[in-house]
Image: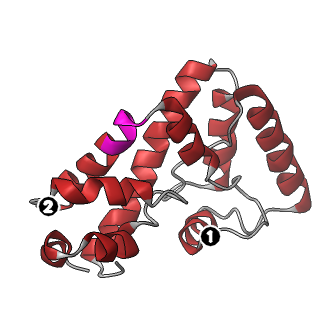
Amino acid sequence: MRLEALNLSSREAFVKSLGWVFEGSPWVAEETWPTRPWNNVDTLHAAMCAMVERAPIARKLALIRAHPDLGSRAKMAQASLSEQKGAGLDQLSPEEYERLQHRNREYAQKFGFPFILAVKGKTKEEVFAALEERLGRSKEEELETALAQIYAIAGFRLREAIEEGAA
């Protein structure tokens, strides 16, 4: 959907078009809708991220926890499947898969939410390196990083949806 159409859409149509951008959290689109009109994709993205920033910590954690584990073979949103495939996470060797699952579990136990990385344009080696590096951080640092990664993912999805007409 074009930005002009989104600016004129009803709340329901807007949420239907972009509620998927923030994984499993259509509330972000719903709460962003009243901030219309947006001049460009960047202002819309900033408005959506601002809604998350203003949300209480419990809602932020729910948003983070709505994301699938990287490399998971569980059912996940089409956008996540496509993004992970682009990073080669659908073609891991059995050893790589087990290593990633082990590190995902370790990360989730330490931080209480899944490891999130905007994998678009990254290789599986970069994914592994980021996971290893981020395991050494504090929970506060990682909460901020997870949200920043979610904002990056949402930005990719939003640009694709609006600029390529997928919304």
Q: Is residue 36 above or below residue 125?
A: below
Which residue is at a point 48% across and 29% down the rendered structure image? 144
Residue under pointer 1 = 81
Say the numbered circle drawn on residue 58: none
Q: Residue 78's spot in the image, x, y percent?
A: 58, 74
Q: Main secondary structure of the magenta part?
A: helix
Residue under pointer 2 = 40
Going by the numbered disc 2, the residue's amino acid type is Asn
Task: Locate residue 161: give its quadrant.
Answer: bottom left
Q: Secondary structure at mark 2?
A: loop
Front residue of 16/91: it is 16
Q: Residue 140's spot in the image, x, y percent?
A: 56, 20
Please state the extent of the stretch shown in magenta in the rendering.
Answer: 51-55
- Can residue 125 be seen in this snapshot? yes
Alpha-carbon neighbours of circle 1 within 10 Å: few (<14), some, or many (≥20)?
some
Judge left or right: residue 167 versus residue 124.
left
Going by the numbered disc 1, the residue's amino acid type is Leu
State how far apart marks 1 and 2 are (Cα): 27 Å
Which residue is at a point 26% across and 80% down the rendered structure image? 1
Q: Circles 1 and 2: CB distance less than 8 Å?
A: no
The answer to if 69 sits in the magenta stretch is no
The answer to if 53 sits in the magenta stretch is yes
Position of the C terminus by quadrant: bottom left
